[in-house]
Amino acid sequence: MTPLITTVLFIAALVLLPAVVMLTLECFAALLPERPYPENPDAQRPSVAILVPAHNEILGIKKTIDTLKPQLQGGDRLVVIADNCSDGTAQLSRKLGATVVERHNLEKRGKGYALDFGRSCLADAPPDVVMIIDADCDVHAGTVASATFMAHESQSPVQVTNLLAPPANPSLKDQLSSFAFKVRTFVRPNGVARLGLPLTLHGTGMAFPWSIFSGLPLGNSNLVEDMQLSLDLLLAGYSPRLCRTGRVTGVLPSQSSAAAQQRKRWEHGHLDTLVNQSPKLLKAAWQQKRLGLVAATLDLCVPPLALLVLLWAGLTSVALAWGWFQLQWLPALVLLAQGVLLLSSILLVWLKYCRHQLPLKALLAVPFYILWKVPIYLSFLFQPQQSWVRTSREEA
């Protein structure tokens, strides 16, 4: 049994290796100097229609509209899709100057259906570019212009920087959640862009040329519609790009139940997409002979950061115990090397991007943060989330 168990542990270590190496490459690449995207300041900005899907967003939509309106110019449209709303979202949005379209369909629920409905309202007079902004975001000045120019000139999908700020009086868990989100939506995308690889979209702050947006498969209730949309675009031959000069910022829920609900939807959706879409991507990469699809598959196979650390810690503990009792050290050595890569990546990213917001001592609470996430991962095994559920909102 000793050779068999050693082999199983070694294979498990090898299975984890691509995710660790890909995360390390992305984090280290993010530390390299930026290559700015060339912009022509004299060029006339293309027309843009901004779609804001909103389901009972009366508490936060004012902030979003107020940050978008100053960035519009003649010929642009700001369209709020009041999707199955039972509050005053539609009325408030009209009062603030947005065009509002209302959709009522309790059977087909989710952001994808709302966007599909909004697209149909643009079809008679399509804009040059369509931008998608969530209804609880602060859109920083200049974001609309930067993303619109880049999407139109490159004729590619574009993703601006997307961040989540911790709530007022954040707990350690909130600070660590914000850090993990920043690694996922800021650090890793910057690394991917510097490596010249395809980007994963993040749901808000996305811009598309109309020629691409008009053909997207939107009408679905996917838990992570942005991730699925990224894969659909890659399979169709389009590689999303990062617009570093644009930025949207949301706020993490302060209520523990709302935060857990949000993380469950994101992470169950990510894991489901990883399991079901990775084989399709690898098959397409082989058929199309596209290295970009291989890189996208490896990026998709990097699980949520807490889960990756949890898997590594669990396997390493078993491998070390096995090495101690049976003197079979090869699996443990492979996993310890991965641990060095993980730890150095996290520490360097913290040092470069987060040390002013997250005290070093807060990283000592990582084990407790991971324990908080364990029920989310266990529920994926026994009761995975199947339907889209909106995260509870708080007043902006």
Image (spheres, rainbow, N blue to C red):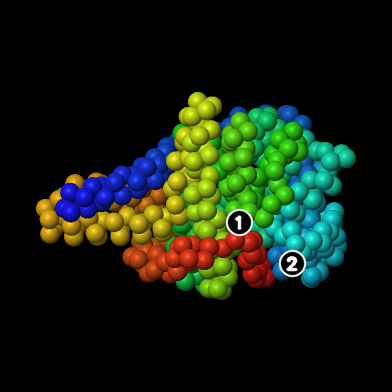
Image coordinates of residue 268 in percent, x first then y, are 52, 59
Pointer 2: residues within 10 angstroms few (<14), some, or many (20+)? many
- Viewed as shown, does residue 361 lie left or right of 180? left
Image quadrant in which the C terminus is located: bottom right
Q: Earlier in the sequence, mark 2 or mark 1?
A: 2
Image coordinates of residue 302 in percent, x first then y, are 44, 48
Mark 1 falls on what kind of element? loop
Most foreground residue, 47 or 366:
366
In the picture, the disc for residue 141 is: none
- Viewed as shown, does residue 94 lie left or right of 115? right
Q: Which residue occupies 49% across, 41% down?
A: 279
The residue that label 1 is drawn on is: 223
Q: Can residue 96 be spotted in the picture?
A: no
Image quadrant in which the N terminus is located: bottom left
The residue that label 2 is drawn on is: 56
Three-letter residue code for mark 1? Leu
Image coordinates of residue 127 in percent, x first then y, are 80, 38
Q: Can residue 251 be spotted in the picture?
A: yes
Image coordinates of residue 206 in percent, x first then y, are 65, 45
